[in-house]
Image (spheres, rainbow, N blue to C red):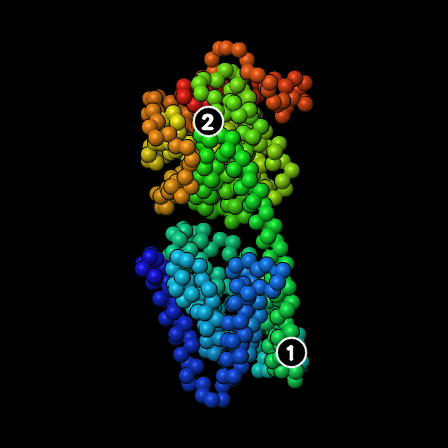
Amino acid sequence: MRALPSAARGCIAGAVLATAVCAAPAVRLGPGAPWADAAALAALHAGCETVRHRPLPGIPVPAGTGPFLTALPVLLAGAFLLPPPLAALTAVPGALLAPADEPSRTARRIWHAAGLALACWAAARLFDVAGPRSLTAPHFPWVLLPALAAATVFCTVLTALDGAVRVTAEGQPPRTAWRGLLRGALGPHLVHGLAGLMTAVLWRSAYGPVAALLVLPPMYLSCWVFAQYHQERIAHRATIRALVQAVDIKDRYTRGHGERVGRASVMIARELGLAEDRTEVLRIAGILHDVGKLGVPTRLLRKEGPLTSQERSLIELHPEYGHEIVRGIGFLGEAREAILHHHERLDGRGYPYGLRGGQIPECARVVAVADAFDAMTSTRSYRRARPVPAAVAELRKCAGKQFDPRMVRALAAALERHGWHPDLIMSADPDPDPDPDPDPDSDPDPAPALPRPTGGPPPGPQLPAPGSRRGGSGAPRGRHAAPRGGRARHHPGRSGDA
């Protein structure tokens, strides 16, 4: 608890106090209250909360999903069957006994218990006012309306609390903390609200509580289906991780760069208030933005010395190579556009297509700023890392010409709020005593720059350019050349940092 911000501790204390106020009237209910039903439902909920650590053989249940999906009908059944104070108490034992992740394990358990108790109380209160006195056949189908309304209130309370803890504990801006939460959670809550109503009806029927337990196996099956989707997402992330590791092994100078660009892209996206699905796409785009280096000869990426014009043109093909590599991976979505266009410039002097302004996809403009920021704040073999304020100042200097000013402002605001901690992903093979950056203020282009091409013999066998099938020869065409009118910084000890 002490490690949490004071605002988060206050939020948890407020939720606990509200729970105590809601549950306190239970002491006045007397022996005639359905205490036995409340105890049975509380025990059943506690059992559901242990599912994730004792899954059925061969049925993996991702942490945080199995218990919730199987316990939700139990909690809503309690809201339909019990007085509001008892419904609130039903959720507390299981939530307090459930395993929790570090850090702040105790605080997580207390917050989980208070949140579920308040949601159960609110749902039971609404159903008590709007629902029928008994759950018998003559009340169907009208009982569905108050039941769905109660499930909606249950979901709304949990969503409100979830957003509150994002603001107080994670420091997210209030205008974005609740964005998309209710829309994503309402559907599952309504479905499981119907399952909870079925459980409550069977509980009160002639068949008794044992028959009500038959509702839970289908819920566990739905959890298993969701787990398969979760495992598929894990496989997707493993694919991304493998591609990133391949790039890091091939270009040892920028190891860890993709992970940091992905993190900076997420910071920009959240500051802009983008939806969570687009934020995830931008994270992947940042991580994979340099995957096209797999198509560039390793000798060019590791070359010690200046590049020839042909070598530079080959390295500048890496956005197109990257797009070719990931083109068939459907789940990447618009991340493929960011991979292809992250070296475009607002003034049209970028590559590979020289797009201008609004022609550049928004995701590519986000990744371009994140890429340049990490390049400037990372130590490379040819220069030391710039301080974060200096890098932000350089981005602002080039805003409107090279970078989208809106993305630059978003990154600056996010850095001011959250700071920058690149040590969480360490780059390998750092130069213990790199040369200082030669005259950094003289270069108006802070993007990762390539050395000036020099004369000399052309390189050895070249990989065919992605456009060679359309243009005939494998030589780079005009659109693969260096940014028009741009200047490149001369770093004699390093090649191809793009």
**Based on the displayed image, in which of its 4 quarters is residue 142 positioned?**
bottom right
Residue at x 44%, y 69% (from the top left corner): 96
Assign a secondary structure to mark 1.
Answer: helix
Quarter of the figure with residue 207: bottom right
Question: Taking the image as drawn, is residue 487 in sight?
Answer: no
Is residue 297 rendered to the left or right of residue 177?
right
Amino acid type of the residue that numbered disc 2 sits on in the rendered structure: Asp
| Relative height, residue 105 to residue 270 (above, below) | below
Q: Quadrant of the N terminus?
A: bottom left
Residue 255 coordinates in the image, percent (x, y): 46, 34
Characterize the local packing of mark 2: few (<14), some (14-19) or many (20 or more) Cα atoms within 10 angstroms: some
Q: Name the residue under label 1.
A: 211
Camera-side residue of 323 and 361:
323
Kindly identify which residue carries mark 2: 497
Whether the residues at callouts 2 and 1 have beta carbons within 8 Å, the answer is no
Task: Identify the residue at horizontal 63%, vertical 40% (top origin).
Answer: 329
Locate residue 44, reporting x and y percent: 54, 74
